[in-house]
Image: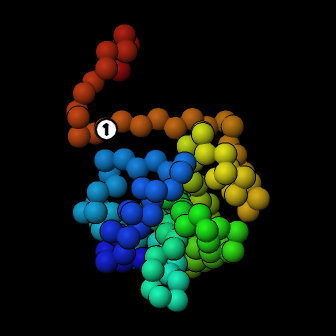
Amino acid sequence: MDAADIPAALALWRVTEGMGLGDSDRPERLAVFLDRNPGLSAVAEDSAGTLIGAVLCGDDGRRACLYHLAVQRERRKSGVGRALVAHCLAGLTARGIEKCNLFLLASNVEGERFWRHEGWTWRENLKVFQKNVAAGTKVDCGCTC
């Protein structure tokens, strides 16, 4: 995947059920992500050159994350998603990254089935917290931190 693929990938992600796009999924931010993680993200195209699948992958030097795996509905169960993930994992292995995480919306039942079928483990002992760092707001939690 490169910057030229971003518009088609965004179009696919926008119509994919269970996909959650956010403020950081603007084309310019995605281009920065691709530049920081060269060769890890991937797209799949049909014989006519139409994008039919896409996935983002990146690492921090210690752990990796997959984001936004999507395949056109009519192309699912044909190995496209599995091939995209295999590309990412091979790239991570080549970089010496040993673990990869992914985020999945709790309501994405079809996605959960896919990931479980592929041997990914649900981590019940973790919770995800997020903060918009650009907002710069501090919440008064009542503590002295």
Above or below, comparing residue 7 to residue 108 in the picture? below
Q: Is residue 127 left or right of residue 77?
A: left
What residue is at 38 percent from the left and 70 percent from the top?
Answer: 8
Element at label 1: loop
Q: Please tell me which residue is depicted at 57% across the width and 53% down the height of the picture.
A: 102
Q: How many C-alpha atoms fall within 10 Å of the one at disc 1: few (<14), some, or many (≥20)?
A: few
Nearer to us in this view, 51 or 93: 51
Q: Relative to residue 44, is residue 142 depicted above or below?
A: above
Which percent across, then down, holds residue 139? 31, 20
Q: Residue 143: x percent and y percent? A: 38, 13
**Quadrant of residue 36 within the rendered picture:** bottom left
Q: What residue is shown with label 1?
A: 132
50 with respect to 126 (left or right): left
Camera-nearest residue between 1 and 51? 51
Q: Amino acid at mark 1?
A: Asn
Q: Residue at x 46, y 47 (%)?
A: 20
